[in-house]
Image: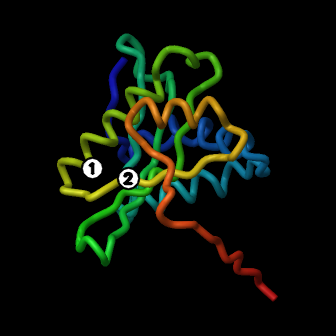
Amino acid sequence: MRIIQASLEHLDLIAPLFVKYREFYGELPFPDSSRAFLEKRLRRQESVIYLALPDDDDNRLLGFCQLYPSYSSLSLKRVWILNDIYVAEDARRQLVADHLLKTAKKMARDTHAVRMRVSTSANNDVAQKTYESIGFREDNEFKNYTLPISRD
């Protein structure tokens, strides 16, 4: 398995798996909007996307993860938000997520980040165990809140 950083040339490879990721979380597929969203992130260099590919095939995507940069005012350092990670159904139980996460962790170190953050569904035990096996720990210091912004 090879892990590479995505560029615009990989857009058609990523987009279908990104749609499956959105569907996994209960969103409507919107393939055109999903592709346009990814294209903007890549074109504007607003995220880092890693792709897991088999050693022998450049046209099959095993999984991906997408990270967004942020910053910590308290530590005066960069933070990476692991916003998306997904493994193709036929590639599960092959340690794809582990390889993606280890690559993301190395990138965070290389960019002198103070930490990576990730959120997952409270009932996604598989993801939680995977994150913990890489070294993520549940945040017991800060309680996180969200504020939905509606278009009223």
User: Label 2 crowding class (10 Å Cα cut-off): few <14, some 14-19, many 20+?
Assistant: some
Residue 114, placed above or below residue 136: below
Task: Tell me where residue 140 appears, x and y as whole percent.
Answer: 51, 57
**Residue 108, numbered label:** 1
Residue type at numbered disc 1: Ala
Task: Report the side of 122 relative to 104 (left or right).
Answer: right
User: What kind of colouring is applied to the model shown?
Assistant: rainbow
Residue 124, placed above or below residue 25: above
Task: Tell me where residue 76 appears, x and y as whole percent.
Answer: 23, 74
Task: Tell me where residue 8 appears, x and y as whole percent.
Answer: 39, 48
Residue 71, placed above or below residue 92: below
Evaluate if marks 1 and 2 touch, with contact meaning CB atoms under 8 Å apart.
yes
**Residue 27, numbered label:** none
Residue at position x 37%, y 67% from top? 70
Q: CA distance from mark 1 to mark 2?
A: 7 Å
- Please name the residue that numbered disc 2 is placed on: 116
Task: Tell me where residue 151 appears, x and y as whole percent.
Answer: 77, 84
